[in-house]
Amino acid sequence: MSSEVIAGLMILFMLVIMFLRVPIGIAMMVSGIIGYSIIDDFSTLTYYMKGSSFAQMASHSLAVIPLFLFMGNLAARSGISRSLFVGVNAFIGHRRGGLALAAVGGCGLFGAICGSSLATAATMGSVALPEMKRHGYHGALATGALAAGGTLGILIPPSIVLIIYAILTEQN
């Protein structure tokens, strides 16, 4: 049997066991192990898995992720997020809808600091949402602006996702 046929069968097997409510990660792992064992010897698979896991653990590339989260936590607790929001609000807050624009701008700046969209949305939500409600913004508009601004954290380098992408593509 060719490797293409085995790959197709393993994808089908993976989909079947996912429909049986097996978690996606386990379904992918089981189908990959079975497929590789059919194509090559199981001892080769175990040798490769041991070497690969050691190589990943010995790599210093992934050490940046907890440091990014730590830096974002420090920024949130030190009040930088409020300062960013107040600073952007001073520039564009006088315009129509300026408070929402300031919230989005603050999200972009805080996202550049911490590298995480989720942390950006949560932190700036706690800072900007009460201020927006105090100025009479409708809840849907305020949370929509903060949700849209929170996604900027993943787009502005260096974000956690872009770092993982660079590691996977072996770029620097």
Image (cartoon, rainbow, N blue to C red):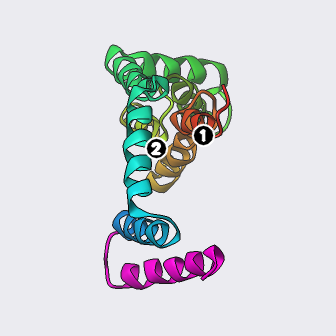
User: Which dot marks residue 165?
Assistant: 1
Tell me: residue 46, above or below residue 27.
above
Q: Does residue 9 belong to the magenta stretch?
A: yes
x 51%, y 24%: residue:
85
Range covered by the magenta-colored residues: 1-23
Tell me: residue 56, above or below residue 39.
above
- Give the class, few, some or many, for how many residues have Cα within 10 Å of label 2's Cα (few <14, many ≥20): few
x 59%, y 31%: residue:
108
Location of residue 52 in the rendering, given as x and y in whole percent from the top left corner: 44, 41
Location of residue 22 in the rendering, given as x and y in whole percent from the top left corner: 31, 75
Which residue is under mark 2? Answer: 136
Q: Predominant secondary structure in magenta?
A: helix
User: Given the image, on which type of amino acid does mark 1 rest?
Assistant: Tyr
User: Given the image, on which type of amino acid does mark 2 rest?
Assistant: Gly
Instruction: Looking at the image, tell me whether mark 1 or mark 2 is earlier in sequence order.
Output: 2
Q: State the separation of the CA atoms marked 1 and 2.
A: 41 Å
Judged by depth in the image, the label closer to the viewer, 1 or 2, is 1
State if disc 2 and disc 1 touch (CB < 8 Å). Answer: no
- Give the class, few, some or many, for how many residues have Cα within 10 Å of label 1's Cα (few <14, many ≥20): few
Going by the image, does 62 lie left or right of 161?
A: left
Residue 58 location, quadrant: top left
Q: Does residue 35 belong to the magenta stretch?
A: no
- In this view of the protein, which residue sits in the foreground, 62 or 12? 12
Is residue 100 at least partly visible in the picture? no
Tell me: residue 116, above or below residue 93.
below
* Quadrant showing the N terminus: bottom right
x 51%, y 26%: residue:
110
SS state under label 1: helix
Is residue 108 at least partly visible in the picture? yes
SS state under label 2: loop
- In this view of the protein, which residue sits in the foreground, 54 or 15? 54
Location of residue 6 in the rendering, given as x and y in whole percent from the top left corner: 56, 78
